[in-house]
Image: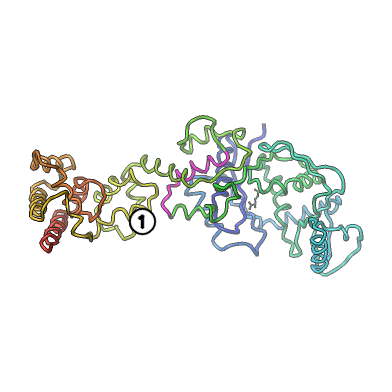
Amino acid sequence: MTQVKVRFAPSPTGFLHIGGLRTALFNFLFARKNQGKFMLRIEDTDKAREVDGAVENIETTLKTFALRYDEGPVFQSQRLQIYQEHIQILIDKGAAYRCYCTNERIAELKKQAELLKQPFRYDKYCLKNPGQTGKSYVVRQNIPEEGITVFTDEVYGEIKVENRLLDDGVLMKTDGYPVYNFANVVDDHLMRITHVIRGEEFISSTPKHVLLYEAFGWNLPQFVHLPLLLDNKRQKLSKRSGDVAVNEYLEKGYLPEAILNFIAFLGWNPKNEQEIFSLEELIEAFDLKKINKAGAVFDVEKLNWFNAQYIQKIPITKLAELAGPHFGRDVSNYPKMFLQQIVQIEKERLTVLTEIGERTMYFFDNPEYETALLQWKQMTEEELKRSVQISQKLIEQVPLDAQKEQIQAAFFDSIGEKDKGSLLWPLRVALTGLKASPGPFEIIEAFFKLTDGKQILQKRLQTALEKLDQV
Ligand code: GLU
């Protein structure tokens, strides 16, 4: 059996988007599942549309997601000689021809087609009138005027197109650069690609590719088109509805493992209940037969769900490291134990890492709050002050290495039968300035990881006392 070989073939016209990453992932999974090869081919023949930094972004993104390729990157712009040779073969076979028509003539033909509300199709003028000359020419594909082109797609089944509906599109431009339709076919053949796995938007170009394979006398690869990505209104996914650079998701604090797991489900599913998959498990479960035809809905809520699941799974040391850049301030001088404790406290509530900054401000800045927030039930100012003073005393007594259980025990012992809220509410507000926050004992435990933790706590309680004095 021939060895499976697939490729991810992005054009460097922008940073890698969710759709591109899905294509890369499915190619990778298929290669690994079948002990095949996965290559990266950069389709950079449209120099005008190339974006600075795109190639680098594609490579680093694949690396971030551990989608390792066995070959490449191969750049099409470095293979122009090969395309020149192959275009000549097609011309010699009559499957392509030089076209000297001016831009003005083509524009005129397009205008006429528009007036007739018909799709533009070149009228084969230069094929029918050989001997044209001119300064420059393009090479066009000579599509048969009759007949039907048929191919079988692994996902969409048999696809048939009448040749008369296809246009004699340009294969090679005046500057000698091939266009996508041509270079793509030549490379897939020369690079022995067995399965062409790509987005559904390329299915309409595939009949032209098939005609080129036939003209060359080459075997067809297996075509596998992946369903369109839709937004939750079932419209084509747009930039606004989430089809943005993968980078942006990483910057927002989504974890690569979560993004990948989410993306695997865009058009594929294991046909069982399992949702959380590591890359290894995805390889194991992946099967082209489980790819759906129907458009895949990109649901950000689902991505959030995956992300929250992965946040729970990551060891706290690693999670604290990943959260580091998301505190919204430089936290490099804070002890690791302090940051880990904060992350530990918040992790259950996090969907994306960026939320950590906003949720934990009170650990870094003294809180500001209305004095009235200190109020618990019907307590008088005097009672409130006494409560805060008890907290001050207890914090002084508890050893710095105490864990929250021990801190809690000390506080609960002191309070006896009284309403716990009368001690804990003013304490928590004094420390956080918030109506709702994690419990005071875990917060105190975190501050204990700072050498001046007790001083900070005392200062905040002192501020509460001063506020109560001013009532
Ligand atoms: N260069 C095309 C793209 O930008 C590749 C399509 C294909 O995989 O054949 O997506």
Magenta segment boundaries in residue numbering: 252-267
Is 109 one of the magenta-colored residues? no
Does residue 219 appear in the picture of this structure?
Answer: no
Question: Residue 347 at x, y = what percent?
Answer: 32, 45
Question: Residue 225 at x, y = what percent?
Answer: 65, 42
Specify whether 211 is left or right of 231: right
- Which of the image's four quarters has the N terminus? top right
Question: Residue 335 at x, y = what percent?
Answer: 24, 53
Q: Is residue 100 above or below residue 252?
A: below
Label 1 crowd (10 A; few <14 / some 14-19 / many >=20): some
- Residue at (12, 40) in percent of width and height: 412
Asked whether 253 or 194 is in front, the reply is 253
- Residue at (27, 51) in percent of width and height: 339
- Residue at (51, 36) in percent of width and height: 282
Tag 1 residue:
325
Specify whether 405 is left or right of 269: left
